[in-house]
């Protein structure tokens, strides 16, 4: 039995036959599995959006497995109750510096690991990579005590401590995210041709110029992919903001979702609306950088 073919137009205008892969039982099973997994991932999001568009009175009377009671009041109430306007700005104050600082420091370490050969090269990479394997909760008590002891000038922190300040959350996120970025960037930089650096050295380029003007432009796909991931991870961070913050006006937007919970009662429709609002910025950033993100992940995949 021959394989079906389709016609594909080439760059010169001629039609060239392209083989279509035969549909086998194994491929049908694979596609069925992928569809089921996709639906399983999309179901919580769709359920949250559906719940956020319904009034609590209707769902209390008819149950959540029903249709009706449509309203947008949950979004308005969630925005006002949780004060999302201020807390979105707080997340920007934390996320943007943390992502930029993480990528800069990680790229510096990765450049040293990839560019130079010395005895502690692999040891340094192993230390940064192993740091990601340490559970964050294991460091809760020592870090909390450290943050309450480290002083800061009054213009940097109202509490005059690293505790209850934006700087504390920025530093803790940078510390925990650098390891992964170093691992990814070092592998990208190792794949760059050595001839580029030899030519740069012949032209008299210093180490800094080799890093900034030769290496960094070539790592833009990797940096874009990491920036997308880091924005998502740091923006969605909840644990450290809850532990290392005490002033409600300074909480990032994810922690402000607690404002939608009552002491004796929680409106799940309202919480769903707040969760959807919180998720919108990360979705926008992902779709804006999607092309660079995919390019960064697939760079080098076709090399033989």
Image: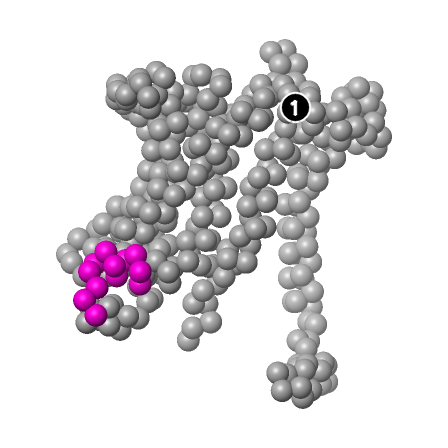
Percent across and percent down for residue 75 are: 69, 27
Q: What stretch is highlighted in magenta?
A: 203-214
Instruction: Name the residue furthest top.
Output: 264
Residue visible at 17% across and 53% down?
120
Name the image quarter holding residue 23.
bottom right
Name the image quarter holding residue 303.
bottom left
Residue visible at 53% across and 26% down?
87
Above or below — where is 274 with respect to 222? above
Predominant secondary structure in magenta?
helix
Q: In this view, does 162 lie to the left or right of 245?
A: left
Determine if the magenta segment contains residue 211: yes
Q: Is residue 297 left or right of residue 193?
A: right
Residue visible at 68% across and 51% down?
36
Q: Which of 61 and 101 is in front in this view?
A: 101
Looking at the rendered image, the quarter that the N terminus falls into is: bottom right
Percent across and percent down for residue 177 are: 37, 42
Asked whether residue 156 is in view, the answer is yes
Q: Find numbered disc 1 in the image and state the secondary structure of the residue it sits on.
A: helix
Looking at the rendered image, the quarter that the C terminus falls into is: bottom left
Above or below — where is 167 with respect to 293? above
Residue visible at 43% across and 67% down?
300
Q: How is the image coloured?
A: one colour
**Count of numbered marks:** 1
Q: Which of 132 and 257 is in front in this view?
A: 257
Q: In this view, does 24 lie to the left or right of 146?
A: right
Residue position marked by numbered label 1 in the rendering: 78
């Amino acid at each position: 039995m021959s394989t079906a073919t389709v016609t594909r137009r080439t760059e010169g205008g001629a039609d060239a036959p392209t083989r279509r892969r035969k549909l086998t039982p194994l491929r049908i099973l694979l596609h069925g599995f992928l569809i089921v997994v996709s639906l399983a991932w999309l179901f919580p999001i769709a359920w949250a959006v559906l719940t956020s568009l319904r009034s609590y009175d209707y769902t209390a009377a008819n149950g959540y497995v029903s249709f009706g009671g449509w309203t947008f009041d949950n979004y308005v109430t969630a925005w006002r109750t949780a004060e999302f306007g201020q807390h979105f700005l707080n997340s920007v104050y934390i996320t943007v510096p943390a992502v930029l600082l993480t990528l800069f420091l990680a790229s510096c370490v990765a450049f040293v690991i990839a560019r130079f050969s010395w005895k502690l090269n692999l040891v340094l990479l192993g230390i940064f990579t192993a740091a990601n394997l340490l559970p964050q909760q294991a460091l809760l008590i020592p870090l909390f005590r450290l943050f309450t002891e480290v002083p800061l000038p009054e213009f940097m922190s109202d509490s005059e401590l690293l505790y209850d300040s934006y700087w504390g959350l920025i530093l803790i996120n940078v510390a925990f995210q650098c390891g992964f970025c170093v691992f990814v960037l070092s592998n990208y930089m190792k794949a760059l041709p050595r001839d580029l650096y030899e030519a740069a050295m012949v032209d008299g380029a210093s180490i800094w110029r080799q890093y900034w003007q030769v290496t960094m432009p070539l790592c833009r796909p990797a940096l874009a992919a990491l920036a997308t991931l880091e924005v998502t991870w740091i923006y969605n961070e909840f644990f450290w903001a809850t532990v290392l913050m005490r002033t409600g006006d300074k909480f990032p937007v994810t922690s402000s979702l607690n404002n939608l919970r009552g002491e004796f009662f929680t409106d799940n429709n309202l919480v769903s609306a707040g969760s959807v609002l919180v998720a919108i910025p990360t979705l926008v950033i992902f779709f804006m950088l999607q092309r660079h993100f995919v390019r960064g992940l697939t760079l080098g995949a076709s090399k033989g």
